[in-house]
Image (cartoon, helix red, strand yellow):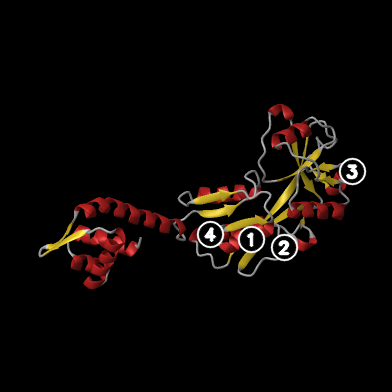
Amino acid sequence: MDLDAVRTFVAVAETDQFQAAADDLGITQQAASKRVANLEKELGVQLFARTARGARLTVDGQALLPHARELLHAAERATAAVTPGRRPLRIDVMNRRTTPSNVLHAFYQQNPGIELDVVTLTGVGTESVLADIGGGTLDATFRSLRDCTVPSGLKAARVIDERHELLVGPRHPLAKAKAVTVAELAGHPVWMPGLSEAEPVGYYDDLAKAFGLTIDTGGPVFGIEALLAEIAHSPRLANLVGEGSRYFWPESYDLRRIPIVDPVVVYPLSVVWRADNPHPVLANFLEYLRIRYEATASDEVWTPGWAR
């Protein structure tokens, strides 16, 4: 059904005059009459009775009017849903427990009136996610971009250096340390089960090779709760977590989060977005990320060669 014809029908019904409706719509009376005539032909009914005093709704016209108004309202809602600045900003944070999610949450707390659609595309390859950004179904994502070329039309900026902490139970040999050097860590295996995405697996391979670490990324995952329970009761299992990641466990677990130093090892993350994306909230978010990174970034950290 032609929305312009429906809009003209409603305008005539509300003014009782084709000329008045045409004036309101910025068209000629002839164009208004033609739109309504086409609508009547499509529906197979007469919508108005033309009289010397104007246009009066027929019984069929009266029946159509509330539905026509509802149809126009639905069209307005559909337009608003995809209009930059009016639809929610759709951001992939990969995992709601990690720093990208925390950073986005902090941005939202400073801008509580914005509309956000927070998604977690865990297990989805970077190339596929970048294709979503290029296609307009996603506004931005956080990725390390290891072995990945950003496609034409997209932009990327490094905005997070996620410092590592060692997560161990109370029986682990390093449990009482206030900080752990990378050299000390080399003597203790790190258990990171269930990693399957190329980016994190590749990063931890780079880290292990650079410092002679043993990082095991194999094995099934039975949920973060089961993982934390195993670490809590083990005298040798350890895991690497981001400084800004959020994990919760029973107090009886007595798990320890120990900073890794000398050097400070970080997982670099970039935000990726489409260069011509006009969403005003996206522009504000990118500026927020830039300012935050400038305030927190340090040259005294280790990153893989591909991130430097």
Return the x and y of residue 244 as percentages of the image width and height. 67, 46
Position in image of residue 241 (x %, y %):
73, 44
Residue drawn at 30 percent across, 55 percent down:
68
Q: Quadrant of the C terminus?
A: bottom right
Give the SS element for disc 3. Answer: loop
Q: Which residue is mark 4?
A: 282
Element type at mark 1:
helix
Among the two numbered marks 3 and 1 on one chain, the one whose residue lies closer to the N terminus = 1
Q: Which residue is mark 1?
A: 130
Q: Nearer the viewer, mark 3 or mark 1?
A: 1
Q: CA distance from mark 4 to mark 1?
A: 16 Å
Front of the two marks 3 and 2: 2
Q: Residue at x 28, y 59 (%)?
A: 44
Task: Give the CA distance from mark 3 to mark 2.
Answer: 32 Å
Q: Is residue 253 above or below residue 206?
A: above
Identify the residue position indicated by label 3 in the image. 187
Residue 234 placement: quadrant: top right
- Residue assigned mark 2: 148
Q: Nearer the viewer, mark 4 or mark 3?
A: 4
| Amino acid type, label 1 | Leu
**Residue flagged by tag 4: what amino acid is it?**
Leu
Task: Name which of mark 4 and mark 3 comes first in the sequence.
Answer: 3
Q: Of all residues shown, which one is farthest toward the left?
A: 52
Whether residues under marks 1 and 2 lie with C-beta atoms below 8 angstroms apart, the answer is: yes
Across the whole image, how many numbered discs are drawn on residues?
4
Q: Which amino acid does the dot numbered 3 rest on?
A: Gly
**Does label 4 or label 1 sit earlier along the sequence?**
1
